[in-house]
Amino acid sequence: LVMQGLITIEDGNADSGIEQMKKGIMLHKATGAQIWRTDQNAHLAEKYLSTNQTEKALEAIHEALIICQQSGHSDHFEPELHRLRALALYQQGEANPEAISNCFFTGLKLAQAQPSLAHELRIITTMCEILEDIPASNKISMLNEVLSKIPEKCETLDIIRAESTLSMLQKRAS
């Protein structure tokens, strides 16, 4: 049901899709299984953010981070949870930019320790898009560094987004 909900959302019916996702997560949780729960909550949080339901997104993220904490080890999706938390705080109008930065840097540290290049790319790209306190030259360096680790033949939406962000920053800097 979670994947079905994602498809329903992509088809333009966010409310129905989110309800399907919530039902799927609830059914999965009822089995007692912990596997995939952080992933499911991250997807739900992302969809809440896309529909400006920030508080609900933060609740889904919080629940997933508790699962990570209870497991005693870093979950492969934990870096993404910190990226989403930073986005939620930003979307909420969090007055403390340091809290947003801390979320990003915690996620980045976890992604690099795993190592998870996909999560590292998403975190750095999002940081470069919304954090105003990082100089453009540093953003350009960070994006160039992470993009240099990716094989040339790869072309995902995240890579395209990172390259677009890099291009925009380079144009502004010149």
Image (tube, rainbow, N blue to C red):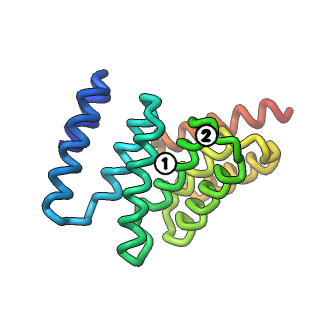
Q: Are marks 2 and 1 in contact (CB under 8 Å)?
A: no
The furthest residue to the right: 174
Residue 28, compared with residue 94, is above or below; it is below
Q: Amino acid at mark 2?
A: Tyr
Q: In this figure, which residue is indicated by the disc labeled 2?
A: 90
Q: Amino acid at mark 1?
A: Lys
Closer to the camera in the image, 52 or 106: 52
* Identity of the residue drawn at 67% across and 49% down: 143
| Residue 108 quadrant | bottom right
| Image spot of residue 19 (x, y percent) | 24, 35
**Mark in the foreground, 2 or 1:** 2
Split into 4 quadrants, where in the image is the C terminus? Answer: top right
Residue 101, compared with residue 159, is above or below; it is below
Q: In this figure, which residue is indicated by the disc labeled 1?
A: 153
* Identity of the residue drawn at 75% across and 52% down: 141
* Identity of the residue drawn at 34% across and 50% down: 41
Q: Secondary structure at mark 1?
A: loop
Instruction: Decide which of tag 2 and tag 1 comes sooner along the chain.
Output: 2
| Drawn side of residue 100 relative to residue 133, left or right | left
| Image spot of residue 42 (x, y percent) | 39, 50
